[in-house]
Image: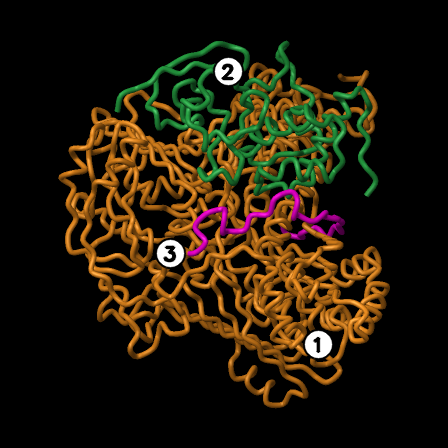
Chain colours: A green, B orange
Amino acid sequence: MSKVHVKYKVNGQDVEGLCEPRTLLVHFLRENLMLTGTHIGCETSHCGACTVDLNGKSVKSCTVLAVQASGGDVLTAEGMTNADGTMSALQEGFRQMHGLQCGYCTPGMIVRAHRLLQENPNPSEEEIRFGIAGNLCRCTGYQNIVKSIQYAAMKLRGEEFKEAAQ
Amino acid sequence: MNDMSPNKIEREAKLEGMGCKRKRVEDARFTQGKGNFVDDIKLPGMLHGDFVRSPYAHARIKSINIKKAMKVPGVLAVLTSTELKGVNLAWMPTLAGDVQMVLADGKVLFQNQEVAFVVATDRYAAADGCEAVEVDYEALPVLVDPFKSMDKDAPELRDDLKGKMTGAHGPRKHYNHIFEWQVGDKEMTDMAFKKADVTIKELISYHRTHPSPLETCQSVASFDKIKGELTVWGTFQAPHVIRTVASLISTIPEHKIHVISPDVGGGFGNKVGAYPGYICSIVASIVTGKPVKWVEDRIENLTSTSFARDYHMTCEIAATKEGKVQALRVHVLADHGAFDACADPSKWPAGFFNIVTGSYDFPTAHCAVDGVYTNKAPGGVAYRCSFRVTEAAYCIERGMDILAQKLKMDPAELRLKNFIKREQFPYQSALGWEYDSGDYHTAMKQGMERIDYAGLRAEQKKRQADFKAGKTRDIMGVGVSFFTEIVGAGPSKNCDILGIAMFDSCEIRVHPTGSALARVGTKSTGQGHETTWAQIIATEMGIPSADIMIEEGNTDTAPYGLGTYGSRSTPVAGAAIAMAARKIKAKAQMIAAWLLEVHEGDLVFDIDGFRVKGLPEKFKSMKEIAWAAYHQVPPGMEPGLEAVSYYDPPNMTYPFGAYFCVMDINVDTGVYTIRRFYALDDCGTRINPMIIEGQVHGGLTEAFAIAMGQEIRYDAGGNCLTGSFMDFFIPTAVETPHWETDHTVTPSPHHPIGAKGVGESPNVGGVPAFSNAVNDAFGFLGSTHIQMPHDYWRNWEAAKTLGLVK
């Protein structure tokens, strides 16, 4: 199959390459750019392990063609760390609040949470749960993921994290 | 550190040993997208394999034509059973003593069975190749209902077993029968039933479901023809077992096989067994001379690798009219699908189902299990539970509720009346187990108090009156579940896998500068072993957790272990870790005595070193001792500071817990609301409370899914109706309830650190709590037992059956 030229800004860097028109964005990221932080869990856009940020919106890269996204600005799990190499508020939140176990859903979850907090810097628990409903986790039962995101939200707002009363 | 040693609290805190909520070591890489999972592996020249699968549940294969597929650009090879027969691998042994087709040989026995394996330059070309393989099928009658499997005119499924009336576990009663397994005293039990004041009998089905970890099953095989060495990276919960199996079924000696489990994205029992994909990637690498990757997609995962449950349990309890249980009789019809690929220890065809007497003091019991074949996917794995323990817990916990209903007794009161008492431990159960320790009454009463059980029952009574008076359409249920697990398989006297005793192991090396490397025979699939194993060592031998590196999953470097499943890591490997650390501590004590010029009996261990009794300023830290171990050992002693332990547990461990679920159900819509869920777990000594709570949350969420909707369903033609996450229920953050956790601590008396294991308790105890809540809600309207899963539709159906909706 003949190949087409695609180019993106991925995690702030200009990249380009050749791929078949049918290549999925997730495969281009993982196979061509070796950005394997973005995972595949279902290939039917249900699980969200492949979530990346495309032009300021969360997308499931298993159901976006690489050519469709060409010219776009892509943010993946690898681009979530602070510029100075330290852990971002979300990454730290997931660690502090035990928001992950096997780690397979985590990159998609953090990329999604990043967009959620851009859209709503002070979400309620209900808004967080609704906001991450496109991302499945089989290990944590979500309770600590919610806390992780609350931790990050508070830190980003410059407040000290307090666990909500149960 | 010596004389100037800081105070004890600071020194202990620095260790980050057992009991502290140590943050996880694993998180730095996973949160930054730097995990290393199987599909992340990319080798030079690597090829991709993909399966042609059967659209039929039962059909004869008339022909397979691969000519067109071989012309597809990028396709390099197509394997069928013909090629596999050439290397004697068309069939493979299962862990349950059966055999399973690797690629369809003559016929197919379930939908999506593996028929051919196409190898190509990339995954897209492999999929193209699969499309081009032509298979001519002749459809055969399909057997879906296990209750019809032993009918006279049932379709005969297994050609390979024709005429063989004895299987791996004794005589077979019918051509679709696999085994009958019996335990207990039938005569005594039957007699107790004859004399009993009250008996109950109910068919309690635990439906077919699937573990579906977020990462599917995958492998990369690379065969080096020059060296004759095979390296396999895979999603293996038990990498050493995979190495031994690979050696036994191939001609490759075991020392030339390197099996590596890198980061694994959840297991839940799905990644214990060996699958056709693993075998085909290995054969394809041998055939092509290049590394071959196989990655299962989600539909393949749900429809072909390892279902769980599908146990149809007829439960009978005999009791006095005062509610004292006298006998338990259970018959199970176990649907194993097309091949018995159950992942149980060899001698246990129905796992540890004989834990079915649960937490209650049954004087006698009898249990029989019949395994049968149907045209469904093979398996029968332990999905987040020890072998068949969740089925057993569900059976007895539903049974006790049904008995309570018949006796018009409160279900919690009935349980309290029948619990094994604290002073009865170690307790010999009627079905052959020796429970190590427990304090059920304390746990139950603590739970009842914390959840205000009496208040809830009063509220429920009022709600029932309101419902009957037409004031509300919402009914309320309080689900009670008190489970006893049996985990930590297991003692070599009764537990083996393919003849290998189910011990586990640990090797620790302390480096000259006082840091350490520990390698363990288990494999974390999210449990956080890199964090918790170091905590055990830290407390046992006084080196800070932060200075201990934990390695698992590489069979070349890790000592032989049986892997991670059945909550066995802490009970078995956790013990091996403590024992290895104690060996090092013993040698360290000799070195310290030499350095301090005292007899070793004059030393006491003090957090992070040895101190001379009565002379507190005479102290040698482990860091100093480690240095001395490499340059200043006592005369005659070998230098170095390392140890290996292989631990054969003397008994299983028996974690337990009290769970309560408060649920409201609207009878007009079937919509339920989980108002509260309270889980008290007793897993003995707690290594890391943060990780325990996380495991309980996750296990409860899986229990919630299973009880309230998650199911693998087939239509009458054997078509799987739940083959994607659209149809197979995985709860999102929106549906998932809020979890309240609590604990008591009753250490295991035989385990070196008293720990029992916890990862699977919430699944085992959670399912009956949800199901009992639904049944408790409907009970006052005349129903006895409603089958799981309790989704909205089935709740509405139940209401309809009871005449509550028109």
Amino acid on which disc 2 is placed: Val
Disc 1 element: loop
Q: Quadrant of the C terminus of chain B?
A: bottom right
Instruction: Give the mark toward the camera: 3 or 2.
Output: 2
Residue B509 visible in the current orientation: no
Mark 1 sits on what residue?
B781
Labels 2 and 1 within one chain: no
Mark 3 sits on what residue?
B378
Disc 2 element: strand
Residue A10, numbered circle: 2
Which residue appears farthest toward the bottom when viewing the image? B195
Subunit ID for the residue under disc 2:
A
Using the image, determine if residue B693 lies above or below residue A83.
below
Instruction: Give the mark toward the camera: 3 or 1.
Output: 1
Is B44 a magenta residue? no
Q: Quadrant of the N terminus of chain B?
A: top right
Disc 3 element: loop
